[in-house]
Image (tube, helix red, strand yellow):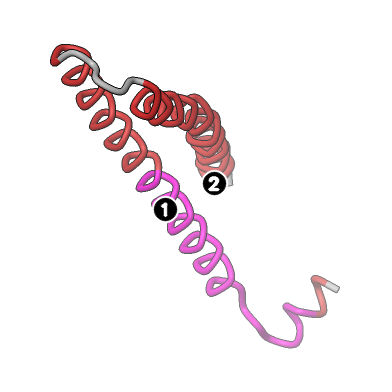
C-alpha cells in the first residue's frame, strides 16, 4: 500500500510539472511567432537563432506531450490493475457496500 501511495504522489508531481512547463513553453512559442511576423527582414544571425529556438521549443513540446501521454497510460493501467484484482464475489461486494 505504501508503494502505491508513493507512486501516486510521484504521478501528481510529474503531472504538475508537465502542466506548469506548458505555460512558459506556449509563451515562448507565441513570442517566436510574433517576432517572425514583426521582423520583416531579420539578419542571418537573428534568423538562425529564431530557427534554433523554434526547434528547441518544438522538441520540448513533444517531450511534454509524450510525458503527459505516458502518465495517462500508467494511470489507466494502474486503475485497470486495481479493478481487475478486486474479487467480484457477492461477499466481497457486500463488504464494500
- Residue at 43% of width from left, 27% of height from top? 34
Residue range (magenta):
65-93
Residue situated in front as seen by the camera: 62 or 51: 51
SS for dot 1: helix
Q: Position of residue 84 (x, y in %)?
A: 53, 74
Q: Position of residue 26 (x, y in %)?
A: 47, 32
Question: Is 53 displayed left or right of 73 in the figure?
Answer: left
Question: Is 51 displayed left or right of 81 in the figure?
Answer: left
Question: Is 91 displayed left or right of 16 in the figure?
Answer: right
Q: Is residue 70 magenta?
A: yes
Residue 63 quadrant: top left
Residue situated in front as seen by the camera: 58 or 86: 58
Q: Is residue 69 magenta?
A: yes
**Which circle's residue, 1 or 2, is located before the other in the chain?**
2
Q: Which residue is mark 1?
A: 69
Q: Quadrant of the C terminus?
A: bottom right
Residue situated in front as seen by the camera: 41 or 62: 41
Which secondary structure is most common in the magenta stretch?
A: helix
Residue 47 quadrant: top left
SS for dot 2: helix
Name the residue furthest right: 97
Tell me whether the residue at label 1 lies in contact with that at label 2, contact meaning CB atoms closer than 8 angstroms: no
Q: Which residue is mark 2?
A: 4
Amino acid at each position: 500500500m505504501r508503494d502505491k501511495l508513493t507512486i501516486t504522489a510521484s504521478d501528481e508531481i510529474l503531472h504538475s510539472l508537465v502542466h506548469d512547463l506548458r505555460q512558459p513553453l506556449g509563451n515562448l512559442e507565441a513570442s517566436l511567432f510574433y517576432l517572425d511576423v514583426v521582423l520583416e527582414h531579420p539578419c542571418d544571425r537573428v534568423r538562425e537563432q529564431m530557427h534554433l529556438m523554434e526547434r528547441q521549443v518544438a522538441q520540448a513540446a513533444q517531450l511534454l506531450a509524450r510525458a503527459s501521454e505516458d502518465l495517462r497510460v500508467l494511470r489507466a493501467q494502474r486503475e485497470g490493475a486495481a479493478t481487475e484484482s478486486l474479487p467480484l464475489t457477492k461477499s466481497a461486494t457486500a463488504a464494500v457496500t
